[in-house]
């Protein structure tokens, strides 16, 4: 019976004299590429612009350096951490006969010191040690992520979008319930189909000094807009606050709900 590969180690035997190893520390504006080239004493590193063609030229240059040193490169293995860039670079490299791997970021052991040094150069050294141990077939160095196809990624997108929309819906409904409870109104469910009709009969208790809040327009907007109202909220949430540098939500649609 064939055993499943858990991606915790490489099943391909490593031949150090014929394998070019490279790791990439990726950022928004640049890539820092560090390599282990057979026959070359120094361990080269090169900072590149975000350009896959420049990366391919660099790998071919290192292959030529290894050939001049008397080593014939039969395998090029490249690895980088999973992150914002996703898997497009790994798919692009594999089409060009380059073995590409995506490292699970949380699988690499890092120092727990509170004020440890952290630079791109040190990160590439850590990636090289972890990736080299993985290529040797040793466990507990790092784990790889299965690289999905574009079709697989597109199939997951509707589910992720729905989860986000459901979260937005729950957050808005909870805020509406909390505001009603503050006025002494309990047991009202804004998600019911007849919530707008029931809203006309809601009254605050006599001992409450707050006057009834005009919830009708708020719930009507919620029921009529449906998921489109949530999508509007998601797009507005991407606006950034200049002072706090954090995403803020524009509550203009629901401003009527908070006027006591």
Image (cartoon, grey):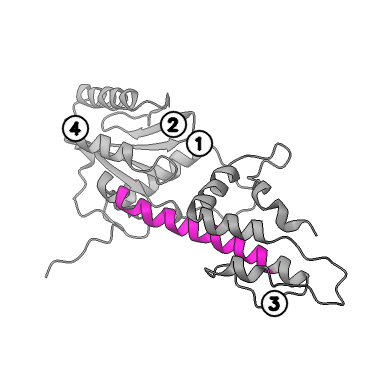
Marks 4 and 3 close (CB-CB < 8 Å):
no
Q: Secondary structure at mark 4?
A: loop
Residue identified by numbered label 1? 120
Query: First in sequence: mark 1 or mark 3?
Result: 1
Residue 188 in the image, given as x and y percentages of width and height: 64, 74
Of mark 4 and mark 3, the one earlier in the sequence is: 4
Q: Residue furthest left?
A: 1
Q: CA distance from mark 1 to mark 3?
A: 55 Å
For the stretch drawn in magenta, what is the main secondary structure?
Answer: helix
Earlier sequence position, callout 4 versus callout 1 = 4
Q: Please indicate whether residue 55 sits to the left or right of residue 249 in the image.
A: left
Q: Which residue is mark 2?
A: 32
Q: Is residue 181 above or below residue 164?
A: below
Mark 4 → mark 1, Cα distance in angstroms: 27 Å
The residue stretch that appears in magenta: 154-177
Marks 4, 2: nearer the viewer: 2
């Amino acid at each position: 019976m064939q055993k499943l590969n858990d991606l915790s180690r490489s099943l391909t035997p490593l031949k150090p004299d014929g394998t070019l190893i490279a790791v990439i520390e990726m950022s928004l504006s640049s890539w820092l590429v560090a390599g282990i080239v057979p026959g070359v004493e120094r361990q080269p590193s090169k900072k590149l612009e975000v350009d896959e063609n420049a990366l391919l030229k660099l790998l071919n240059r290192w292959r030529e350096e290894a050939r001049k040193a008397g080593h014939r490169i039969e395998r090029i293995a490249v690895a980088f951490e999973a992150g914002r860039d996703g898997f497009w670079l790994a798919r692009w490299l594999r089409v060009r006969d380059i073995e590409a791997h995506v490292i699970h970021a949380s699988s690499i052991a890092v120092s727990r010191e509170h004020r440890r040094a952290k630079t791109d150069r040190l990160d590439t050294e850590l990636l090289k040690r972890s990736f080299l141990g993985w290529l040797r077939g040793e466990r507990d160095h790092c784990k790889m992520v299965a690289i999905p196809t574009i079709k697989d990624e597109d199939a997951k997108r509707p589910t992720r979008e729905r989860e986000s929309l459901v979260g937005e819906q729950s957050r808005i409904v909870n805020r509406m319930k909390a505001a009603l409870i503050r006025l002494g109104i309990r047991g009202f469910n804004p998600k019911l189909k007849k919530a707008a009709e029931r809203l006309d009969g809601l009254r605050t208790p006599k001992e409450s000094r707050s006057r009834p809040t005009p919830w009708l327009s708020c719930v009507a907007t919620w029921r009529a807009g449906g998921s489109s109202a949530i999508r509007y909220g998601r797009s507005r949430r991407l606006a950034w606050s200049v002072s706090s540098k954090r995403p803020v939500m524009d509550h203009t649609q629901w401003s009527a709900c908070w006027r006591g």
